[in-house]
Amino acid sequence: VYFSSVDCNVCHAVRPKLEALLSGVPVKIAQVESSKFIEIAGQHLVFAMPTVLIFQEGKEILRESRFIDFEKIERLVHLLFD
């Protein structure tokens, strides 16, 4: 789940990188506009933008906020799908 905000310039740069990283992998990216869906962001304790949450079987297995570590996400994706 990708939490972003309309007025967050970093958020606009992260989304394409995240999509490129996950292309060819059987996952879906759900984007949540935090200012419109405050309740959902609150339920997941998301207070900083951008935030990436990765779930497996309904459990959060990775959380990256503000400065997204794409290498960490890539390592996790390889562990899950290779």
Image (cartoon, grey):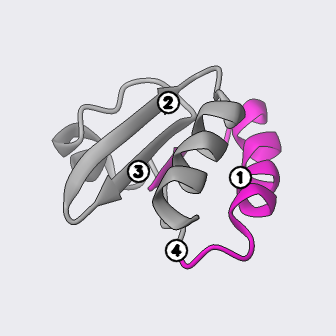
Q: Earlier in the sequence, mark 2 or mark 1?
A: 1
For the residues labelled 2 and 1, the Cα–Cα distance comes to 12 Å
Give the residue type that dot 1 points to.
Leu
- As helix, strand or loop, the secondary structure at mark 1 comes to helix
Which residue does the numbered mark 4 point to in the structure image? Answer: 28
Circle 2/circle 3 CB separation < 8 Å: no
Which residue does the numbered mark 1 point to in the structure image? Answer: 18
- Pointer 2: residues within 10 angstroms few (<14), some, or many (20+)? some
- As helix, strand or loop, the secondary structure at mark 4 comes to loop
User: Which residue is at the front of the view, 79 or 71?
Assistant: 79
Q: Earlier in the sequence, mark 2 or mark 3?
A: 3
Is residue 14 part of the magenta span, yes or no?
A: yes
x 60%, y 54%: residue:
78
Q: Quadrant of residue 7?
A: top right
Q: Is residue 45 above or below residue 14?
A: above
For the residues labelled 2 and 4, the Cα–Cα distance comes to 17 Å
Q: Earlier in the sequence, mark 1 or mark 4?
A: 1
Instruction: Give the extent of the magenta segment.
Output: 1-27
Which residue does the numbered mark 2 point to in the structure image? Answer: 64
Q: Earlier in the sequence, mark 4 or mark 3?
A: 4
Instruction: Answer whether residue 8 is visible to the viewer in this image.
Output: no
x 72%, y 77%: residue:
24
Give the residue type that dot 3 points to.
Ile
Q: Earlier in the sequence, mark 2 or mark 4?
A: 4
For the residues labelled 3 and 1, the Cα–Cα distance comes to 12 Å
For the residues labelled 4 and 3, the Cα–Cα distance comes to 10 Å
Give the residue type that dot 2 points to.
Glu
Which residue does the numbered mark 3 point to in the structure image? Answer: 54
Q: Is residue 19 left or right of residue 13?
A: left
Q: Is residue 44 left or right of residue 33?
A: left
Residue 79: give x, y in percent of width and height. Answer: 51, 51
